[in-house]
Amino acid sequence: MRYFIYGSPIFLKSNLISIKSIFGNFKVESNFINSYIISAHSASLNNKKSEINFLYRVLKILKTEKISEKNYLEDIKNTLIKTTIPNKKIRLECVDINSRRGYSAKDIEVYLGEYLEKIGAKVTLKNPEILCYIILFDMNCHIGFISYKKLSFIDPGRHYKTLSSGISRAEFKLMEAFDEFKIKLKPDQIAFDLGASPGGWSVLMAKKGVNVLAIDQGEMFSDKIKKLNINYIEATTPNMSKFKKNNIQILHIRKKFQEAIGFLDYVKKADIITCDMNISPEEASKAVLLFSGKLKKNAKLIFTIKCKTKFAKKYVEEAKTILSKHFKIESITALPSNRQELTLYGKFKN
Ligand SMILES: C[S@@+](CC[C@H](N)C(=O)[O-])C[C@H]1O[C@@H](n2cnc3c(N)ncnc32)[C@H](O)[C@@H]1O
Protein backbone atom coordinates (compact mmCIF):
# COMPACT_ATOMS: atom_id res chain seq x y z
CA MET A 1 0.00 0.00 0.00
CA ARG A 2 1.16 3.54 -0.80
CA TYR A 3 0.68 6.63 1.34
CA PHE A 4 1.10 10.34 0.81
CA ILE A 5 2.61 11.95 3.89
CA TYR A 6 3.15 15.63 4.49
CA GLY A 7 5.01 16.77 7.63
CA SER A 8 6.99 19.58 9.22
CA PRO A 9 9.52 21.25 6.89
CA ILE A 10 11.74 22.05 9.89
CA PHE A 11 11.87 18.85 11.92
CA LEU A 12 12.62 16.53 9.02
CA LYS A 13 14.31 13.80 11.06
CA SER A 14 11.35 13.77 13.41
CA ASN A 15 9.01 13.26 10.43
CA LEU A 16 10.81 10.04 9.56
CA ILE A 17 10.76 8.88 13.19
CA SER A 18 6.99 9.55 13.30
CA ILE A 19 6.45 7.64 10.04
CA LYS A 20 8.41 4.72 11.49
CA SER A 21 6.33 4.75 14.64
CA ILE A 22 3.16 4.50 12.55
CA PHE A 23 4.25 1.97 9.92
CA GLY A 24 7.24 0.06 11.25
CA ASN A 25 9.08 -0.74 8.03
CA PHE A 26 8.50 1.55 5.08
CA LYS A 27 10.20 2.62 1.87
CA VAL A 28 10.34 6.22 0.67
CA GLU A 29 9.44 6.19 -3.03
CA SER A 30 9.49 9.96 -3.58
CA ASN A 31 10.55 12.76 -1.29
CA PHE A 32 10.57 16.52 -1.68
CA ILE A 33 11.54 18.37 1.52
CA ASN A 34 8.61 17.54 3.84
CA SER A 35 6.42 15.54 1.43
CA TYR A 36 6.78 11.82 1.03
CA ILE A 37 5.25 9.03 -0.98
CA ILE A 38 5.98 5.85 0.93
CA SER A 39 5.11 2.21 0.51
CA ALA A 40 4.43 0.15 3.61
CA HIS A 41 2.75 -3.12 4.41
CA SER A 42 0.71 -2.33 7.47
CA ALA A 43 -0.38 0.73 9.31
CA SER A 44 -1.93 1.56 12.62
CA LEU A 45 -3.07 4.93 11.38
CA ASN A 46 -5.39 5.82 14.22
CA ASN A 47 -2.80 4.98 16.76
CA LYS A 48 -0.49 7.99 16.89
CA LYS A 49 2.12 6.79 19.33
CA SER A 50 4.50 9.70 19.41
CA GLU A 51 4.07 12.30 22.08
CA ILE A 52 4.59 15.07 19.53
CA ASN A 53 2.80 14.93 16.23
CA PHE A 54 5.05 16.13 13.41
CA LEU A 55 2.94 14.85 10.49
CA TYR A 56 0.14 16.92 8.98
CA ARG A 57 -1.37 14.33 6.68
CA VAL A 58 -1.11 10.55 6.27
CA LEU A 59 -3.28 9.56 3.32
CA LYS A 60 -3.87 6.26 1.64
CA ILE A 61 -3.32 6.16 -2.13
CA LEU A 62 -5.65 3.97 -4.15
CA LYS A 63 -4.23 4.39 -7.64
CA THR A 64 -0.82 5.40 -9.01
CA GLU A 65 0.01 5.85 -12.70
CA LYS A 66 2.93 7.39 -14.58
CA ILE A 67 2.17 10.68 -16.32
CA SER A 68 4.02 12.18 -19.27
CA GLU A 69 5.13 15.68 -20.20
CA LYS A 70 3.23 15.46 -23.45
CA ASN A 71 -0.16 14.33 -22.19
CA TYR A 72 0.02 15.80 -18.72
CA LEU A 73 -3.66 16.61 -18.13
CA GLU A 74 -4.96 13.62 -20.09
CA ASP A 75 -2.76 11.22 -18.13
CA ILE A 76 -3.99 12.64 -14.83
CA LYS A 77 -7.58 12.26 -16.03
CA ASN A 78 -6.91 8.69 -17.13
CA THR A 79 -5.55 7.83 -13.69
CA LEU A 80 -8.66 9.24 -12.08
CA ILE A 81 -11.05 7.26 -14.23
CA LYS A 82 -9.22 4.04 -13.40
CA THR A 83 -10.37 4.47 -9.78
CA THR A 84 -13.87 3.62 -8.60
CA ILE A 85 -15.31 7.10 -8.33
CA PRO A 86 -17.73 7.19 -5.38
CA ASN A 87 -21.35 7.90 -6.25
CA LYS A 88 -21.40 10.79 -3.78
CA LYS A 89 -20.83 14.54 -3.82
CA ILE A 90 -17.11 14.94 -4.48
CA ARG A 91 -14.71 17.82 -4.01
CA LEU A 92 -11.42 17.62 -5.86
CA GLU A 93 -8.12 18.83 -4.49
CA CYS A 94 -4.87 18.64 -6.35
CA VAL A 95 -1.42 18.95 -4.77
CA ASP A 96 1.26 19.39 -7.40
CA ILE A 97 4.66 18.82 -5.86
CA ASN A 98 7.69 20.05 -7.84
CA SER A 99 5.64 20.45 -10.97
CA ARG A 100 7.19 22.27 -13.92
CA ARG A 101 4.24 21.85 -16.26
CA GLY A 102 2.75 25.33 -16.16
CA TYR A 103 -0.63 24.25 -14.78
CA SER A 104 -1.70 25.37 -11.33
CA ALA A 105 -3.34 22.90 -8.96
CA LYS A 106 -6.55 24.85 -9.53
CA ASP A 107 -6.30 24.45 -13.34
CA ILE A 108 -6.06 20.70 -12.86
CA GLU A 109 -9.03 20.64 -10.47
CA VAL A 110 -11.14 22.61 -12.95
CA TYR A 111 -10.13 20.34 -15.84
CA LEU A 112 -10.93 17.17 -13.90
CA GLY A 113 -14.10 18.64 -12.42
CA GLU A 114 -15.47 19.54 -15.85
CA TYR A 115 -14.65 16.08 -17.14
CA LEU A 116 -16.28 14.32 -14.17
CA GLU A 117 -19.42 16.42 -14.57
CA LYS A 118 -19.60 15.40 -18.24
CA ILE A 119 -19.55 11.74 -17.30
CA GLY A 120 -22.25 12.26 -14.67
CA ALA A 121 -20.22 12.30 -11.43
CA LYS A 122 -21.36 14.69 -8.71
CA VAL A 123 -18.69 17.35 -8.33
CA THR A 124 -19.27 20.20 -5.92
CA LEU A 125 -17.60 22.76 -3.68
CA LYS A 126 -20.70 23.12 -1.49
CA ASN A 127 -21.39 20.41 1.12
CA PRO A 128 -19.26 17.67 -0.43
CA GLU A 129 -19.32 14.18 1.10
CA ILE A 130 -16.02 12.94 -0.26
CA LEU A 131 -12.67 14.61 -0.81
CA CYS A 132 -10.79 13.23 -3.80
CA TYR A 133 -7.07 14.02 -3.66
CA ILE A 134 -4.80 14.05 -6.66
CA ILE A 135 -1.12 14.13 -5.74
CA LEU A 136 1.34 14.80 -8.56
CA PHE A 137 4.83 13.79 -7.60
CA ASP A 138 7.88 12.76 -9.67
CA MET A 139 5.80 12.33 -12.86
CA ASN A 140 3.38 10.02 -11.07
CA CYS A 141 -0.26 10.72 -10.38
CA HIS A 142 -1.51 9.33 -7.04
CA ILE A 143 -5.20 9.35 -6.24
CA GLY A 144 -7.29 8.59 -3.17
CA PHE A 145 -10.61 9.42 -1.49
CA ILE A 146 -11.53 10.27 2.07
CA SER A 147 -14.75 11.22 3.81
CA TYR A 148 -15.08 15.02 3.88
CA LYS A 149 -16.09 14.78 7.54
CA LYS A 150 -12.68 13.33 8.35
CA LEU A 151 -10.72 15.73 6.19
CA SER A 152 -11.88 18.77 4.29
CA PHE A 153 -8.66 19.85 2.59
CA ILE A 154 -5.16 18.59 1.86
CA ASP A 155 -3.12 21.70 1.27
CA PRO A 156 -3.28 23.88 4.40
CA GLY A 157 -1.31 26.74 2.81
CA ARG A 158 -3.90 27.20 0.08
CA HIS A 159 -6.86 26.72 2.39
CA TYR A 160 -5.91 29.21 5.12
CA LYS A 161 -4.65 31.87 2.72
CA THR A 162 -8.18 32.48 1.51
CA LEU A 163 -9.44 32.99 5.10
CA SER A 164 -6.73 35.36 6.34
CA SER A 165 -7.37 38.98 7.36
CA GLY A 166 -3.85 39.91 6.21
CA ILE A 167 -2.60 41.29 9.52
CA SER A 168 0.19 38.77 10.04
CA ARG A 169 1.35 35.40 8.83
CA ALA A 170 1.02 34.25 12.45
CA GLU A 171 -2.75 34.26 11.99
CA PHE A 172 -2.50 31.00 10.01
CA LYS A 173 -1.03 29.25 13.03
CA LEU A 174 -4.04 30.05 15.18
CA MET A 175 -6.53 29.14 12.43
CA GLU A 176 -4.78 25.81 12.09
CA ALA A 177 -4.74 25.28 15.85
CA PHE A 178 -8.49 25.97 16.14
CA ASP A 179 -9.19 23.45 13.37
CA GLU A 180 -6.70 20.83 14.54
CA PHE A 181 -7.84 20.91 18.18
CA LYS A 182 -11.50 21.49 17.27
CA ILE A 183 -11.76 24.68 19.33
CA LYS A 184 -14.90 26.72 18.83
CA LEU A 185 -14.96 30.16 20.40
CA LYS A 186 -18.25 31.84 21.27
CA PRO A 187 -19.26 35.51 21.16
CA ASP A 188 -18.65 37.43 24.39
CA GLN A 189 -15.98 35.06 25.64
CA ILE A 190 -12.79 36.65 26.97
CA ALA A 191 -9.27 35.97 25.71
CA PHE A 192 -5.83 36.95 26.93
CA ASP A 193 -3.40 37.16 24.03
CA LEU A 194 0.22 37.31 25.23
CA GLY A 195 2.64 38.59 22.59
CA ALA A 196 -0.19 39.93 20.45
CA SER A 197 1.50 42.41 18.13
CA PRO A 198 0.91 43.12 15.23
CA GLY A 199 -2.50 41.55 15.93
CA GLY A 200 -3.20 38.50 13.76
CA TRP A 201 -4.33 36.26 16.62
CA SER A 202 -6.27 39.00 18.41
CA VAL A 203 -8.11 39.88 15.21
CA LEU A 204 -8.98 36.26 14.48
CA MET A 205 -10.52 35.91 17.94
CA ALA A 206 -12.24 39.30 17.80
CA LYS A 207 -13.84 38.31 14.49
CA LYS A 208 -15.45 35.41 16.36
CA GLY A 209 -17.01 37.89 18.80
CA VAL A 210 -14.47 37.33 21.58
CA ASN A 211 -13.26 40.27 23.70
CA VAL A 212 -9.50 40.22 23.58
CA LEU A 213 -7.03 41.63 26.06
CA ALA A 214 -3.97 41.94 23.84
CA ILE A 215 -0.65 42.26 25.65
CA ASP A 216 2.49 43.32 23.85
CA GLN A 217 4.97 46.17 24.13
CA GLY A 218 4.98 46.30 20.34
CA GLU A 219 2.66 48.17 18.03
CA MET A 220 -0.59 46.67 16.73
CA PHE A 221 -1.63 47.35 13.12
CA SER A 222 -4.42 49.58 14.40
CA ASP A 223 -5.36 51.09 11.02
CA LYS A 224 -5.74 47.69 9.39
CA ILE A 225 -7.63 46.39 12.45
CA LYS A 226 -10.07 49.29 12.36
CA LYS A 227 -10.62 48.81 8.63
CA LEU A 228 -11.89 45.33 9.50
CA ASN A 229 -14.59 47.06 11.61
CA ILE A 230 -13.08 45.82 14.84
CA ASN A 231 -13.46 48.12 17.80
CA TYR A 232 -9.85 48.50 19.00
CA ILE A 233 -8.26 50.75 21.60
CA GLU A 234 -4.91 51.00 23.28
CA ALA A 235 -5.27 51.07 27.09
CA THR A 236 -3.14 53.64 28.81
CA THR A 237 -4.35 53.23 32.40
CA PRO A 238 -5.57 50.09 34.14
CA ASN A 239 -9.16 51.36 34.35
CA MET A 240 -10.78 48.90 32.06
CA SER A 241 -14.45 49.14 32.95
CA LYS A 242 -14.73 50.37 29.35
CA PHE A 243 -13.71 46.94 28.05
CA LYS A 244 -17.16 45.45 28.40
CA LYS A 245 -19.36 48.56 28.48
CA ASN A 246 -18.14 50.13 25.27
CA ASN A 247 -18.04 46.87 23.38
CA ILE A 248 -14.33 47.06 22.83
CA GLN A 249 -13.23 43.97 20.96
CA ILE A 250 -9.49 44.37 21.30
CA LEU A 251 -8.01 46.21 24.23
CA HIS A 252 -4.27 46.54 23.72
CA ILE A 253 -2.11 46.88 26.79
CA ARG A 254 1.06 48.20 25.26
CA LYS A 255 3.40 46.75 27.84
CA LYS A 256 5.54 43.69 28.44
CA PHE A 257 3.52 40.96 30.15
CA GLN A 258 5.57 41.53 33.35
CA GLU A 259 4.10 45.04 33.59
CA ALA A 260 0.57 44.14 32.54
CA ILE A 261 -0.39 41.98 35.49
CA GLY A 262 -1.93 44.93 37.37
CA PHE A 263 -4.52 45.28 34.59
CA LEU A 264 -5.97 41.88 35.47
CA ASP A 265 -7.75 43.25 38.55
CA TYR A 266 -10.15 44.96 36.15
CA VAL A 267 -11.11 42.07 33.90
CA LYS A 268 -13.35 39.06 34.23
CA LYS A 269 -11.95 35.54 34.08
CA ALA A 270 -10.93 34.45 30.60
CA ASP A 271 -12.10 31.48 28.52
CA ILE A 272 -8.90 31.21 26.52
CA ILE A 273 -5.28 32.28 26.85
CA THR A 274 -2.98 32.34 23.85
CA CYS A 275 0.76 32.89 23.91
CA ASP A 276 2.93 33.47 20.85
CA MET A 277 5.71 35.45 22.55
CA ASN A 278 9.09 35.06 20.92
CA ILE A 279 10.90 34.25 24.15
CA SER A 280 12.15 30.95 25.61
CA PRO A 281 9.51 28.31 26.35
CA GLU A 282 10.50 28.48 30.02
CA GLU A 283 9.89 32.25 30.28
CA ALA A 284 6.73 32.07 28.21
CA SER A 285 5.31 29.21 30.31
CA LYS A 286 5.97 31.16 33.49
CA ALA A 287 4.16 34.12 31.95
CA VAL A 288 1.11 31.96 31.25
CA LEU A 289 1.08 30.78 34.86
CA LEU A 290 1.14 34.42 36.03
CA PHE A 291 -2.10 35.00 34.15
CA SER A 292 -3.69 31.69 35.12
CA GLY A 293 -5.23 33.13 38.33
CA LYS A 294 -7.65 34.89 36.01
CA LEU A 295 -8.74 31.87 33.99
CA LYS A 296 -12.00 29.97 34.11
CA LYS A 297 -11.91 26.23 34.80
CA ASN A 298 -11.17 24.38 31.56
CA ALA A 299 -10.02 27.60 29.91
CA LYS A 300 -8.12 26.74 26.77
CA LEU A 301 -4.44 27.40 26.19
CA ILE A 302 -2.80 27.73 22.79
CA PHE A 303 0.93 28.15 23.19
CA THR A 304 3.73 28.15 20.63
CA ILE A 305 6.88 26.42 21.84
CA LYS A 306 9.74 28.30 20.20
CA CYS A 307 12.60 25.92 19.44
CA LYS A 308 15.98 27.65 19.11
CA THR A 309 17.49 24.45 17.69
CA LYS A 310 15.97 21.39 16.03
CA PHE A 311 16.06 19.39 19.29
CA ALA A 312 12.37 19.99 19.78
CA LYS A 313 12.09 17.63 22.75
CA LYS A 314 14.26 19.82 24.97
CA TYR A 315 11.96 22.82 24.47
CA VAL A 316 8.84 20.71 24.82
CA GLU A 317 10.11 19.44 28.18
CA GLU A 318 10.80 23.02 29.36
CA ALA A 319 7.26 24.10 28.56
CA LYS A 320 5.57 20.92 29.79
CA THR A 321 7.32 20.88 33.16
CA ILE A 322 6.02 24.35 33.99
CA LEU A 323 2.64 24.35 32.27
CA SER A 324 1.52 20.93 33.48
CA LYS A 325 1.35 22.31 37.03
CA HIS A 326 -1.89 24.04 36.09
CA PHE A 327 -2.81 22.75 32.63
CA LYS A 328 -3.75 19.37 31.27
CA ILE A 329 -1.64 19.06 28.10
CA GLU A 330 -3.93 17.74 25.38
CA SER A 331 -1.62 17.83 22.39
CA ILE A 332 1.72 19.05 21.06
CA THR A 333 1.77 19.34 17.29
CA ALA A 334 3.79 20.80 14.45
CA LEU A 335 1.18 22.71 12.46
CA PRO A 336 1.78 23.57 8.80
CA SER A 337 2.39 27.26 9.48
CA ASN A 338 4.67 26.70 12.46
CA ARG A 339 8.24 27.50 11.52
CA GLN A 340 10.82 26.54 14.11
CA GLU A 341 8.19 25.96 16.77
CA LEU A 342 5.44 23.59 17.89
CA THR A 343 1.92 24.34 19.06
CA LEU A 344 0.74 23.14 22.45
CA TYR A 345 -2.92 22.83 23.34
CA GLY A 346 -3.90 22.59 27.00
CA LYS A 347 -6.82 23.06 29.37
CA PHE A 348 -6.69 24.88 32.69
CA LYS A 349 -7.14 22.36 35.53
CA ASN A 350 -8.01 24.47 38.60
C1 LIG B 1 5.58 36.17 16.84
S1 LIG B 1 5.14 37.73 17.43
C2 LIG B 1 3.43 37.52 17.75
C3 LIG B 1 2.57 37.56 16.53
C4 LIG B 1 1.11 37.58 16.88
N1 LIG B 1 0.66 36.32 17.45
C5 LIG B 1 0.22 37.88 15.68
O1 LIG B 1 -0.67 37.09 15.39
O2 LIG B 1 0.39 38.92 15.04
C6 LIG B 1 5.83 37.70 19.02
C7 LIG B 1 5.51 38.89 19.89
O3 LIG B 1 5.90 38.61 21.23
C8 LIG B 1 6.14 39.88 21.83
N2 LIG B 1 6.86 39.75 23.11
C9 LIG B 1 8.12 39.31 23.31
N3 LIG B 1 8.41 39.42 24.62
C10 LIG B 1 7.33 39.90 25.26
C11 LIG B 1 7.02 40.25 26.60
N4 LIG B 1 7.92 40.12 27.57
N5 LIG B 1 5.78 40.72 26.89
C12 LIG B 1 4.87 40.89 25.90
N6 LIG B 1 5.11 40.58 24.60
C13 LIG B 1 6.32 40.11 24.28
C14 LIG B 1 6.94 40.62 20.75
O4 LIG B 1 6.87 42.02 20.96
C15 LIG B 1 6.25 40.18 19.48
O5 LIG B 1 5.33 41.13 19.03
Image (tube, rainbow, N blue to C red):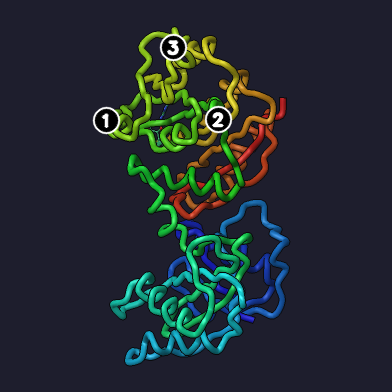
Indicate which label's residue lies in the foreground, 2 or 1: 1
Kindly state the secondary structure of the residue where label 1 is placed: helix
Residue shown at 61%/84% (left/top)? 84
Left or right, residue 160 beside residue 302:
left
Q: What residue type is labelled 3?
A: Lys
Q: In this view, does 14 lie above or below 236?
A: below
Q: Which mark is residue 271?
A: none
Q: Is label 1 in contact with label 3 (beta carbons under 8 Å)?
A: no
Kindly state the secondary structure of the residue where label 3 is placed: helix
Quarter of the C terminus within the rendering: top right
Mark 1–mark 3 Cα distance, whole angstroms, equals 21 Å
Residue indicated by mark 1: 223
Residue shown at 28%/77% (left/top)? 102
Kindly state the secondary structure of the residue where label 2 is placed: strand
Q: In this view, does 132 lie above or below 304?
A: below
Q: How would you rate the neighbour count of disc 3 (Cα within 10 Å): few for under 14, some for 14-19, many for 20 or more?
A: few
* Dot placed on the residue nearer the N-terminal end, 2 or 1: 1
Residue shown at 37%/74% (left/top)? 98
Q: Where is residue 176 in the image (x, y as percent from the top left)?
A: 51, 49
| Total count of labels | 3
Q: Where is residue 49 in the image (x, y as percent from the top left)?
A: 71, 58
Residue indicated by mark 3: 242
Q: Choose between 205 and 14: the one closer to the eye.
A: 205
Quarter of the N terminus within the rendering: bottom right
Q: Quarter of the image holding residue 184?
A: top right
Mark 2–mark 3 Cα distance, whole angstroms, equals 21 Å
Q: In this view, does 233 lie above or below 58?
A: above
Q: How would you rate the neighbour count of disc 2 (Cα within 10 Å): few for under 14, some for 14-19, many for 20 or more?
A: many
Mark 2–mark 1 Cα distance, whole angstroms, equals 25 Å
Is the shortest distance between ligand 1 and the CB of mark 3 under 8 Å?
A: no
Q: How would you rate the neighbour count of disc 1 (Cα within 10 Å): few for under 14, some for 14-19, many for 20 or more?
A: few
Residue indicated by mark 2: 273
